[in-house]
Image: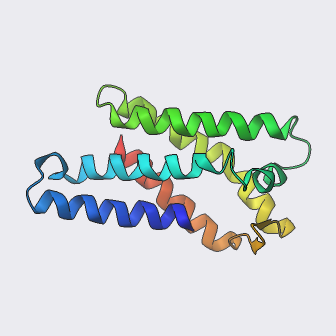
Amino acid sequence: MAPFIVLILSFLILRITGVLGILYFDGWDTSLRVAVALMFLLTATAHWGKRRPDLIKMVPQGVPNPEFIVTITGILEIVGAIGLLIPLTSRITSIGLALLLIFMFPANIYAARKGITFSGKPSTPLFSRTIIQIIFLTAVILAG
């Protein structure tokens, strides 16, 4: 839920700063690109922090080397966040991040169905997680 909150709040704060005179954030597109980048930077931190074991447990059984998958997806999130901030690469980066979200969604389904906890808290229910995922996908595509 924290990534969703970061996405929404940072977008609103950036848009307000644009309206108040910081020209860089005067358009919704730049504000959205930065908000999505912040969201992905936040999610990437979990790939190496205290939540790493929970992310490893999320990887569905049968997927080889879950530790490597978690590391690679974290790196891709960081690279994607940076790529969104560069106008020349933002379009292709948004496509890559959208594919990454789609690729990682089965792990969210697995976590919801298996009752995997995150820092002792239950995972987001599947219906809510699906709605949030659609919002993330929409934001990522629009950011590009």
Q: Is 96 on the left or on the right of 91, as rendered?
A: right
Q: Is 34 on the left or on the right of 14, as rendered?
A: right
Most distant residue in the right direction = 62
Most distant residue in the left direction = 21
Q: Is 16 on the left or on the right of 132, as rendered?
A: left
Where 76 falls versus 48 (above or below)?
above
Residue 43 location in percent, x, y?
A: 58, 51
Q: Could you tell me which residue is drawn at 19 percent across and 51 percent down? A: 25
Most distant residue in the top direction = 88
Query: Where is the C terminus found, in terms of image quarters?
Result: top left
> Is residue 96 visible in this depiction of the protein?
no
Number of residue marks: 0
Where 94 falls versus 128 (above or below)?
above
Q: Could you tell me which residue is drawn at 78 percent across and 33 percent down? A: 68
In front: 108, or 8? Answer: 8
> Is residue 3 visible in this depiction of the protein?
yes
Residue 80 location in percent, x, y?
A: 49, 36
Q: Could you tell me which residue is drawn at 68 percent across and 71 percent down? A: 124
Where 101 falls versus 89 (above or below)?
below
Residue 136 location in percent, x, y?
A: 49, 56
Q: Could you tell me which residue is drawn at 41 percent across and 32 percent down? A: 83
Q: Is 134 on the left or on the right of 69, as rendered?
A: left
Query: Where is the N terminus found, in terms of image quarters?
Result: bottom right
